[in-house]
Amino acid sequence: MDHVRAQGVDPAALEAAFDTWMRMSAWPVIIVSSAIFIVILKLYRPSITWWGHVCAYLVAMNALSVITLVAVVLSLTGLELLAAVVGGLAMVIYLAAFVRIGAGVFKLGPFELVALFLGVVIGNILVAAVMAGLQFALAIYIVSRFDLSLLQLIEISIEASSS
């Protein structure tokens, strides 16, 4: 933070700006990222309404969320290894929920279910990239408002942690 102070910026003000902007952008980033899955689902069964696809997506997300909450509780109680196992299990249950929705609601055959599974896996990669990209762009915007460079701050942080 010495570099930030040297630039004439109050570190507390910079941290407050990050906190405010990241909180304000959380839901829009999640909605944009979720739209990827809804489009993927729509590609597999275009005859179902958009609302039907949103509901199907939310069922899979709820399955993931319930198991993730268990992992968080385990982590908070000091059972990190078990929390990691349950966290991995959460992703398996999430993917299984999508396949179950594909078989039950969308009436997909075996090959279509494999394609749906692969689509969801690729969708997860896309979502991670979109979310990271949007958050990185927002971070660049925030530090630029303070006449700072995010890349310089990252370099300084890396140098400080390595020494």
Image (tube, rainbow, N blue to C red):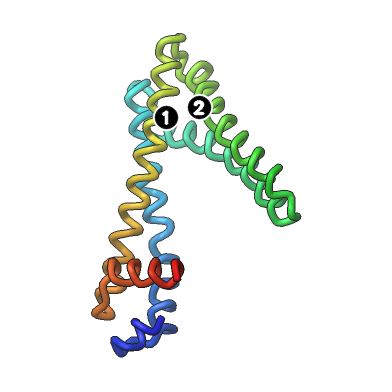
Q: Which of pointers 1 and 2 lies earlier in the amino acid sequence?
A: 2
Q: Is residue 122 left or right of residue 83?
A: left
Amino acid carrying mark 1 in the image:
Val
Q: Is residue 12 above or below residue 28?
A: below
Q: Is residue 109 left or right of residue 155?
A: right
Cβ atoms at labels 1 and 2 below 8 Å apart = yes
Q: Position of residue 16 (x, y in %)?
A: 43, 78
Q: Position of residue 66 (x, y in %)?
A: 64, 42
Q: Sort mark 2 into few (<14), some (14-19) or many (20+) by Cα contacts within 10 Å.
A: many
Amino acid carrying mark 2 in the image:
Phe
Residue at 39% in and 49% down: 31
Please identify the quarter of the rendering in which residue 89 is found.
Answer: top right
Q: Is residue 8 above or below residue 71?
A: below
Q: Sort mark 1 into few (<14), some (14-19) or many (20+) by Cα contacts within 10 Å.
A: many
Q: Name the quadrant of the C terminus.
A: bottom left
Residue at 37% in and 31% down: 122
Q: Residue 118 versus residue 35: which sits nearer the camera?
A: 118
Q: Position of residue 121 (x, y in %)?
A: 42, 30
Q: Position of residue 45 (x, y in %)?
A: 37, 21
Tag in front: 1 or 2:
1
Say which residue label 1 marks: 120
Say which residue label 2 marks: 98
C-alpha separation, residue under disc 1 versus residue under disc 2: 8 Å
Residue at 47% in and 35% down: 57
